[in-house]
Image (cartoon, helix red, strand yellow):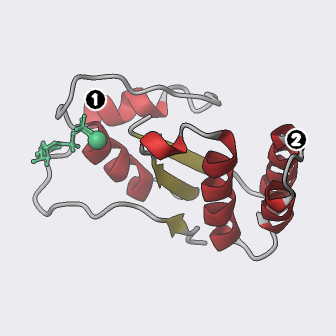
Amino acid sequence: MIEPKIALPRLQPGMLRRPHLLEMVDGDGGATLTMVNAPVGYGKTTLLRLWCIERSEAVVWMTLDAADDDPVRLWTHLATAVERLGQGLGGRTLMSLGVRGAPVEAAVDELMNGLVAYGRPVAIVLDDL
Ligand SMILES: Nc1ncnc2c1ncn2[C@@H]1O[C@H](COP(=O)(O)OP(=O)(O)OP(=O)(O)O)[C@@H](O)[C@H]1O
Ligand SMILES: [Mg+2]
């Protein structure tokens, strides 16, 4: 089964495959959080983009900008992307976030429930963190 890849950035043609780095991102397969840290322009986005398409599991990609340094905005964007993965998966989160003054933590819990309801592994990439 081919799992969806949501919002992957465009990849320039002719990119070099970097097997050693792809393996490093894979790790032992058990990581829940992986941080990719390298100087500007070293190929982080390109590497992760390649990694995403070579994996069978579902991927939700988010490219962050300065405005995402706001919890409501960040989680709204992520929930919108997760909703594209499957209808209803991010809907309750979006509703919670739409209630002014409601705790963001409750919305995050809803999003986790949505991801669990998906029933299969999902990789979330936050680029430009
Ligand atoms: N695997 C690769 N093969 C060939 N060229 C590459 C590769 N990775 C990166 N490049 C070149 O380097 C440029 C910068 O790569 P990329 O945008 O992935 O870096 P980055 O580390 O994400 O940069 P930034 O820190 O600005 O986000 C690409 O546009 C491409 O021209
Ligand atoms: Mg980048």
Label 2 neighbourhood size at 10 Å, few (<14), some (14-19), many (20+)?
A: few
Residue furthest to the bottom in view is 87
Residue 109 is left or right of residue 60, and the answer is right
x then y, percent, for residue 9:
34, 60
**Residue bearing mark 1:** 20
Amino acid type of the residue that numbered disc 1 sits on in the rendered structure? His
Q: Quadrant of residue 47?
A: top left
Query: Which residue is at a point 87% across and 44% down the rendered structure image?
Result: 109
Quarter of the figure with the C terminus: top left
If you read the primary sequence from the N terminus, does the residue marked by circle 2 or circle 1 appear first?
Answer: 1
Q: Quadrant of residue 45?
A: top left
x then y, percent, for residue 91:
81, 68
In the depicted view, which residue is nearer to us: 11 or 72?
A: 72
Q: Quadrant of residue 41?
A: top left
Question: Under tag 2, what secondary structure?
Answer: loop
For the residues labelled 2 and 1, say whether their Cβ atoms are less than 8 Å apart.
no
**Residue bearing mark 2:** 103
x then y, percent, for residue 61:
49, 54
Residue furthest to the front in view is 100
x then y, percent, for residue 12:
16, 61
Q: Residue 3, which numbered label?
A: none
In the depicted view, which residue is nearer to us: 58 or 61?
A: 61
Query: Which residue is at a point 10% across and 58% down the rendered structure image?
Result: 14
Amino acid type of the residue that numbered disc 2 sits on in the rendered structure? Pro
Label 1 neighbourhood size at 10 Å, few (<14), some (14-19), many (20+)?
A: few
Query: Which residue is at a point 72% across and 73% down the rendered structure image?
Result: 86
Q: CA distance from mark 2 to mark 1?
A: 42 Å
Q: Name the quarter showing ligand 1.
A: top left
Taking 88 as reference, is 78 above or below it?
above
Residue furthest to the left in view is 14
Question: Under tag 1, what secondary structure?
Answer: helix
Mark 2 residue's CB less than 8 Å from ligand 2: no
